[in-house]
Amino acid sequence: MSHIGSALTLAEKKLVVHVKHYFDREKKLSLKNNKDICVDNSARRAAQATNLSEVTVWRIMAEYNKNKTLSSPVPKGSSPYAVNDCVKTICQDIIRSYNIRREHLSLRLLVGILNDEFGISVARETLRRSLYRWKILHGSVQRHTALRERDYVVKARREYLIRKRYLNNSKRMLVYLDETFINKNYSGSDSSWYCSDWNNDSRLDKSFGPYINKPAGKGERFIILNAVTKDGWVNGTQLQDS
């Protein structure tokens, strides 16, 4: 253990002190009893000199005799994650693309895609914990604003209201027809994976939005026809199954 030109560490200084004190005690014991010290068990003497256990001395010597060198101790602290953070962006884009296509993506399927298309092998529960750590959550999906009106509808309503105001000033009996529809079966809130930090990550493909573009539902609907005048609703409203 050569330290020419370099400073000793605190642990090495303490080791020197322990060895010096041990041999001082050994010297005093030899002079007091006027007899030689038994030097048969070198491992025990090294353990006593360095203030270590005999097992530790044997372990260190076994490593040195095998490798002819000594390795640095393993640094303490949290162990590295089993899934590298570079997989995060891949998972986000896969999840987002499935959401946009309105396709269900399970954890099992995500593990298969990573293995088949990207050569990334990871256990299902390990990936589940990683998704949670990356703020990729599993829960009720969010929707786009599916009922947003188009520009021509807004324009037609504006023209209708202007015309209605003009007719109201004519003092004539006016009857307005109103049509309302109700779907018989709405699509409920499903559960899926979605990325909560989509807007905060500049590396992600913004063409894949954070929401699931999920339709309201398909099937029959009820259409209710109403008629109204300035005096109120007209009796005889019809209910039509369409």
Image (cartoon, rainbow, N blue to C red):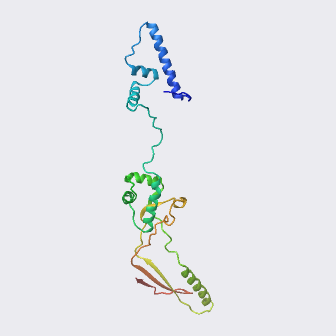
Q: Residue furthest top?
A: 34
Q: Quadrant of residue 219?
A: bottom left
Residue 68 to residue 174: above or below = above
Residue occupying the point 62% across, 89% down: 166
Residue 232 position in % (x across, y down)? 54, 85
Task: Look at the image and tell me whether residue 28 can be seen.
Answer: yes
Q: Nearer the viewer, residue 97 or 163?
A: 97
Residue 31 position in % (x across, y down)? 46, 8
Residue occupying the point 41% across, 12% down: 37
Residue occupying the point 49% across, 85% down: 226
Residue 43 to residue 226: above or below = above
Quarter in which the C terminus is drawn: bottom left
Q: Nearer the viewer, residue 36 or 165?
A: 36
Q: Quadrant of residue 189?
A: bottom left
Residue 199 position in % (x across, y down)? 54, 61
Task: Look at the image and tell me whether residue 140 can be seen.
Answer: no
Q: Nearer the viewer, residue 103 or 235?
A: 103
Q: Residue furthest front?
A: 4
Q: Quadrant of residue 214?
A: bottom left
Residue 185 position in % (x across, y down)? 40, 74
Q: How many marks?
A: 0
Direction from residue 151 to residue 120 in the image, left or right: left
